[in-house]
């Protein structure tokens, strides 16, 4: 059974969300522990599933694909097999960065990275509309990024 998270665990999670490349020594200094206990806590947090993986976040402005488009899909009722095929195809598409089921008039929301609007139009017709069950696509092109973070709050919610 997982141990309850301590304030030190929370600090470790906050720090590695900011920079997962920190050495255990640097991380220990930032959270107020010596190196060995910090390493043991970090390993426990990984084993308990608090840390799923560690990745590098690339600067998308260095690449051709730097436009985000949010696409919402209206879906037909799918069999289990067709739903699994939809999920598999979405997971295999490197251009679809995120996919969510949503409440409301629409059923699915996709976050797509695209190099241009003509490219995206082709992607809609050649890929999205050919996914199982897709009846309609509505797209919103983002103009500017105001906030982007991969950090999630790990402390109890506090009122602003």
Image: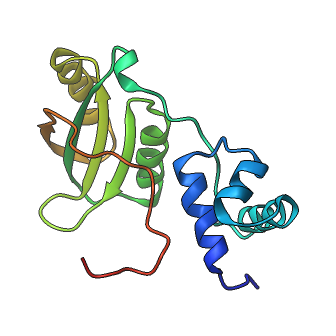
Which residue corresponds to the image point at 33% horizontal and 44% vertical from the top-left? 132
The percent coordinates of residue 61 (x first, y second) are 34, 21
Q: Please count the marks in the image.
A: 0
Residue 51 x %, y %:
64, 59
Tell me if 106 is positioned left or right of 45 in this view: left
Query: Split into 4 quadrants, where in the image is the N terminus?
Result: bottom right
- Up-down: is 63 above or below 99? above
User: Quadrant of residue 32 in the image?
Assistant: bottom right
Residue 88, position in %: x, y? 49, 43
Relative to 74, say whether 112 is above or below: above
Q: In this view, does 144 lie to the left or right of 2?
A: left
The colour mode here is rainbow
Q: Is residue 127 visible?
A: no
Q: Residue 98, how many percent across, how many down? A: 38, 46
Q: Which residue is drawn at 60% across and 40% down?
A: 55
Asked whether, in this view, residue 93 is left or right of residue 7, the answer is: left
Q: Which of 59 and 123 is in front in this view?
A: 59
> Can residue 98 be seen in this snapshot?
yes
On the image, which quarter does residue 160 sit in?
bottom left
Residue drawn at x 59%, y 67% as measured from the top left:
11
The answer to which of 45 and 116 lies nearer the viewer is 45
Residue 68 in the image: above or below residue 45: above
Q: Which is nearer the eye, 27 or 81?
A: 27
The residue lying toward the viewer, choosing from 26 and 109, is 26
């Amino acid at each position: 059974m997982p141990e309850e998270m301590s304030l030190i665990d929370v600090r470790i999670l906050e720090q590695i969300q900011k920079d997962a490349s920190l050495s255990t020594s640097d991380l220990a200094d930032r959270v107020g522990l010596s190196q060995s206990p910090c390493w043991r806590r970090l390993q426990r947090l990984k084993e308990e599933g608090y840390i799923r993986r560690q990745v590098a976040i690339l600067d998308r402005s260095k690449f051709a694909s730097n436009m985000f488009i949010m696409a919402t899909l209206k879906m037909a009722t799918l069999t289990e097999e067709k739903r699994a095929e939809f999920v598999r195809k979405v997971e295999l598409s490197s251009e679809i960065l995120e996919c969510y089921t949503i409440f409301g008039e629409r059923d699915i929301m996709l976050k797509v990275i695209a190099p241009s609007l003509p490219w995206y139009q082709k992607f809609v017709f050649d890929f999205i509309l050919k996914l199982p069950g897709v009846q309609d696509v509505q797209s919103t092109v983002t103009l500017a990024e105001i906030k982007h973070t991969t950090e999630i709050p790990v402390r109890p919610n506090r009122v602003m």
